[in-house]
Image (cartoon, rainbow, N blue to C red):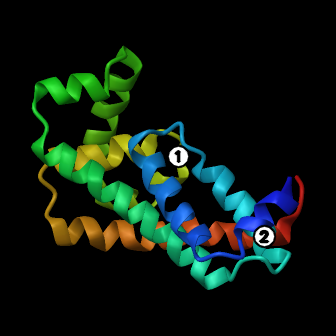
Amino acid sequence: MFDDLSDLSDSPASYLAVLALVALDAVFPLAPSETVLVTGGILIERGDLIAPVFVLAAACGAVLGDSILFRLGSRAGPGLRAKLFSSERARERLRVVERLVHERTWLLIVSDFVPGGRTAAMFAAGALGLPTLRFYGFIVPGALLWAGRSLDRRRDGPP
């Protein structure tokens, strides 16, 4: 499997694919951003990807996806909100996250590490009218920390 993936890593398109998959994961949490980080760490270790470029691509993808959700949240009416958070569990998660983002904005830094938390947190930040500069002041460091995990994973080895 990794031999097939390393064929892709010979191309700059690999880094664009990383960026796109990570951005897509923010809006549609079924996309495999965690798998992208793990695979990227392995390919970095093998010498098939350049670590700083991979981390930058993953972080930019995270910021792009977060930005889309932030904008959706800031422009969302009840209809879009109901569509994106259709189940009772999703609506409850959004209510909790809205309260947390309002009270503890710094949690945006760690929201990428929580499955499903990223989508709700970024949408909530937009819906709450968080100032744009403040939003980016938290999500950019968070995205870099999250993407940098690919480097940690390659040193840790299997659990």
Q: Nearer the viewer, residue 119 or 61?
A: 61
User: Which amino acid type corresponds to the residue marked 2 in the rendered image?
Assistant: Leu
Image side of residue 87 versus residue 101, left or right: right
The structure residue drawn at horizontal position 58% and vertical position 81%, both measured from the top left corner, is 53
Q: What element carries label 1?
A: loop
Q: Residues within 10 Å of mark 2 (few under 14, many from 20)?
A: many
The picture places residue 16, in percent across and down from the top left corner, at: 51, 68
Image side of residue 51 versus residue 26, left or right: right
* Quadrant housing residue 106: bottom left
The picture places residue 147, in percent across and down from the top left corner, at: 57, 68
Q: Mark 2 points at which residue?
A: 43
The structure residue drawn at horizontal position 57% and vertical position 70%, both measured from the top left corner, is 13
- Along the polypeptide, which appears first: circle 2 or circle 1? 2
Up-down: is 118 above or below 40?
Answer: above
Q: Is residue 12 visible in this depiction of the protein?
A: yes
Q: Which of 113 and 42 is in front in this view?
A: 42
Q: Mark 1 points at which residue?
A: 114
Number of numbered tags placed on the structure image = 2
The picture places residue 38, in percent across and down from the top left corner, at: 73, 58
The structure residue drawn at horizontal position 19% and vertical position 44%, both measured from the top left corner, is 73
Up-down: is 72 above or below 50?
Answer: above
